[in-house]
Amino acid sequence: MPAAASDAALTASAPLAEKLRPRVLSDFVGQEHLIGDGSLLLSLVESRAIGSMILWGPPGCGKTTLARLLSTSTDGIFKELSATSSGIADVKKIFDEAKRTLKLTGKRTILFMDEIQRFNKAQQDIFLPYVENGWITLIGATTENPSFKLTSALLSRCRVFVLERLSDEEITTILTNAIQRASQVDANQEVEPDRGLRPISSEVMKTIVNLSIGDARTALSLLELVLTSPRKATDASIISHLRRSVSSRYDRSGEDRYDMISALHKSIRGSSGDGAMYWLARMLTAGEDPLYIARRLIVVASEDVGLADHRALTLAVSAYNAVQMIGMPEARITLAHLVAYLAEAPKSTRSYEAYKRAEEAAKMDETAPVPMHLRNAPTKMMKEMKYGEGYLYNPSYRHAL
């Protein structure tokens, strides 16, 4: 097969999100705070002086597209890798090529490293000398908090730009543009009457926007599913199919987990029963381990309810044991019982705050000796050394000392 035909076949088989990826910055939708008039990133692009950076944002917010568009603003050579499918050997190969190219042509290589947080701390160190010496421009993309996942040495050599989840209006704009472009292509093709692109109703469009949750890639994938559905299919069947096709994007090893457990904890602390129940449901329906939630609720019982209601801790421990014994789906009822109790219980942080003050005092003098009258004196020799001397056993006195 000729090379041109082979390339055309690859393009035709690409998903809609890839086919419609913007080719110029003016077509990019969203992230106005980064590329809008007067923004820092736009000024760097206009001055053709982009440096190494980390793009941090949720899936489908435009990190890969933005990286590719930024590379076109320079005369550098663009290379792209993903830490999910590439190793250190692949990175070293690009670095060797980059040094040779820089020496021969003076052109710097721009390396886009997708999912850079998948590299461990030792693997991330490979970027340091090349970024430090200016042999490459690194554009890393991550969906997770860089301050937790990337080394401080790498972060100190890169600017961090935060991309936001796309709004419903921005997702709608992306979908509308995609439908227009797809319709233009369809109009130029000869198709049978019952074939071709399926019209999109406002109800289906609204469903796609809601299900995508600010993820343009998901939105375009759902749109492609609708456009290629049989024309005879009803909106109800299409919407039902769309809902089944969207899997939960809750990441039990990522930031979503900790954001949601934080929301659950804070809702209980604020005595918001409805809010706490909502976040419990969000986590359980997303597939979170119920025992993880139960463990965190034991902490809440001591930290936030504490001395105000001694039964809270007992109930929390009992709930953990119950969840362990019965499992899901019935365990959700036990957790709901506990969450409702903790949210409605009076709150006291006296024990928590008292321990923090004691901890601060302990750190001030970690070598302070135990007073003689409080020391243990199990042997005759220790008693002769005055251990325990002067201690008054409180139960022996009518009034505690």
Image: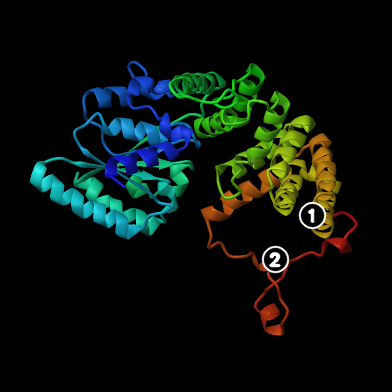
Q: Which mark is residue 374?
A: 2
Q: Which mark is residue 218?
A: none
Q: Position of residue 120 (x, y in %)?
A: 42, 56
Q: Residue at image x 29%, y 51%?
A: 127
How dense is the environment of label 2, judged by Cα within 10 Å: few (below 14), some, or many (20 and up)? few
Nearer-the-camera pick, 318 or 293 = 293
**Colour mode of the rendering:** rainbow
Q: Residue at image x 48%, y 41%?
A: 143
Q: Where 97 falls versus 70 (above or below)? A: below
Badges 1 and 2: C-beta atoms under 8 Å apart? no
Q: Residue at image x 66%, y 36%?
A: 263
Nearer-the-camera pick, 321 or 351 = 321
Kindly tell me whether residue 401 is visible in this rendering: no
Q: Quadrant of the C terminus?
A: bottom right
Instruction: Point out the tag, 1 or 2, that comes first from the N-terminus.
Output: 1
The part of the image, by quadrant, that contains residue 156 is top left
The part of the image, by quadrant, that contains residue 342 is top right
Q: Is residue 77 left or right of residue 240?
A: left
- The kind of residue tagged 2 is Leu
Identify the secondary structure beneath mark 1.
helix
Front position among marks 1 and 2? 1
Q: Position of residue 56 (x, y in %)?
A: 43, 37
Q: Position of residue 357 (x, y in %)?
A: 62, 46
